[in-house]
Image (cartoon, rainbow, N blue to C red):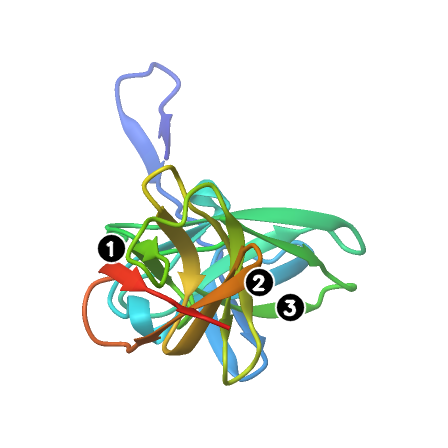
Amino acid sequence: HSTSFSSDFQTKTDERSSLRFATSLGFADGAFAWGKPVTGGFAIARPHSSLRGRKVVIDGANGSSRFFGPALVSNLPNYSRRDLAVDVENLPAGYDLGAGSISVRAPYNAGYRLVVGSADNLTVIGRALNELGLPISFVSAKAKRRSDGKEVELFTNANGIFAANGLGPGAWDISFNTEPETTKISFDLNNIGDATRRLGDLRGTVE
């Protein structure tokens, strides 16, 4: 805003105001996002369907999803790696976001389409018991999904209790090396309910 006065500064001769506004529309892999002007590479981030309706924040204040579309991060350096911190407002208790960051390396003025969250977001808590009903204590193992072979590491404490992150719907098996035999525990997960699943006591069978 600027104002001009007469030579004796008693009378206003001119008064002007100006407003500048800059924005950009990003498009990558079928996704659109609106945000700050793009200065290099860019990334468009939207929430996974399991996080529908929740606000996604990428790289601090650089990008956030809004009621009118996904988040747009508009200042990725060309040909350089950038780690983007990921956060979700009001994230459900037990929801596993993974590493909490996404690494990108943008080509010249190119864009990424990112999805924050996944179907494999569950935290599972259970108590592993052997065939006799005794705790399987201080044993490391891997939970393996039958459909695709995905594996998640876990460890039991003195009472046989374990917690495993990043599991999703499907049939899972855990094989514990309880010498001289192996004890197998199986359980099923669905996509209905909270992100934290408490399975209680799980009695295994000897293989």
**Residue ID for mark 2:** 43
Q: Disc 1 or 2, which lies upstream in sequence? A: 2
Instruction: Tell whether 192 sits left or right of 183.
Output: left
Residue 149 locus on image (x, y percent): 57, 77
The residue under label 3 is which amino acid type? Gly
Q: Disc 3 or 1, which lies upstream in sequence? A: 1
- Identity of the residue furthest to the top in this view: 8
Q: Is residue 198 visible?
A: no
Could you say whether the residue bearing mark 3 is in a helix, strand or loop? strand
- Dividing the picture into quadrants, the one containing residue 113 is bottom right
Q: Does residue 27 lie above or below 164 as drawn? A: below
Write the residue at 39% across / 73% down. Answer: 119
The residue under label 1 is which amino acid type? Pro
Write the residue at 30% across / 57% down. Answer: 55
The residue under label 2 is which amino acid type? Ala
Q: Nearer the viewer, residue 130 or 24?
A: 130
Could you say whether the residue bearing mark 1 is in a helix, strand or loop? loop
Instruction: Tell whether 102 sits left or right of 64.
Output: right
Disc number for residue 111? 3
Q: Disc 2 or 3, which lies upstream in sequence? A: 2
**Residue ID for mark 1:** 92
Distance in Å between CA atoms under marks 3 and 1? 29 Å
Crowding around mark 3 (Cα neighbors within 10 Å: few <14, some 14 to 19, many 20+) is many
Label 1 or label 2, whichever lies nearer to me, is 1
